[in-house]
Image (tube, rainbow, N blue to C red):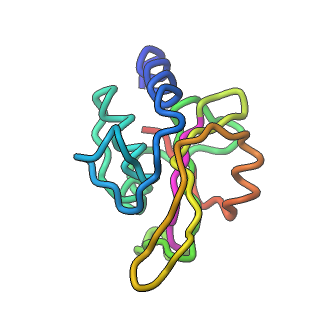
């Protein structure tokens, strides 16, 4: 990813802060509603990089990065109790967060308020401090660069 793409990615993400979270939001609902993976898929699409729709498939993309070498545009993938599993990530992937630099992240954050008869979550796109996000969402499974 070029520096120009990184700058546009971060600016686009910041411009979407406050947009509402919707569980299972589809690409067609962007940029009005997002879930975590539709948010990252939309952002990367704005800079010409195609990402798959789901967190587990996004985690399969790109190259792994050490947390000490993170750059704006890197994606952090967290385990989730309701995550998706495959042979590469048997512990599961449940959430994805965009690193924007300066120890900050932006993601479609949510909290579950109902399970049955259907899942209901509420939230919005938020900018948060990296360490706070890691502590809240841990464990961090992998960091990827596309």
Q: Which residue lies furthest to the left in this view?
A: 28
Which residue is at 35% across, 62% downward?
A: 24
Q: Residue extending furthest top?
A: 4
Residue 63 location (% of width, % of height)? 47, 45
Rendered residue at 76%/57% (across/down): 135
Q: Where is residue 131 in the image (x, y as percent from the top left)?
A: 77, 46
Where 72 falls versus 130 (above or below)? above
Left of 118 or right of it: where is 105? right
What secondary structure is the stretch in magenta mostly built from? strand
Front in this rendered view, residue 77 or 26:
26
Look at the picture and state if 123 lies above or below 62: below
- State left or right for residue 132 relative to residue 79: right
Q: Nearer the viewer, residue 95 or 143?
A: 95
The vertical placement of 138 against 61, above or below, is: below
Q: Give the range drawn in magenta.
A: 92-99
Q: In which quarter of the image is the N terminus?
A: top left
**Magenta residue check for 95:** yes
Q: Which residue is drawn at 40% across and 74% down?
A: 86
Image location of residue 60, percent across then percent down: 40, 56
Question: Where is residue 41, by image quadrant?
Answer: top left
């Amino acid at each position: 990813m070029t520096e120009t793409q990184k700058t546009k990615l971060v600016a686009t993400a910041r411009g979407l802060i406050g947009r509402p979270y919707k569980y299972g939001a589809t690409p067609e609902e962007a940029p009005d509603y997002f879930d975590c993976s539709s948010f990252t898929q939309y952002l990367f699409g704005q800079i010409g990089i195609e990402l798959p729709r789901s967190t587990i498939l996004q985690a399969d993309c790109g190259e792994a990065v050490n947390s000490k070498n993170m750059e704006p545009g890197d994606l952090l993938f967290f385990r989730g109790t309701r995550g998706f599993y495959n042979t590469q990530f048997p512990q599961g992937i449940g959430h994805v967060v965009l690193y924007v630099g300066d120890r900050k992240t932006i993601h479609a954050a949510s909290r579950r308020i109902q399970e049955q008869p259907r899942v209901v979550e509420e939230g919005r796109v938020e900018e948060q401090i990296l360490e706070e996000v890691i502590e809240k969402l841990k464990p961090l499974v992998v960091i990827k660069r596309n």
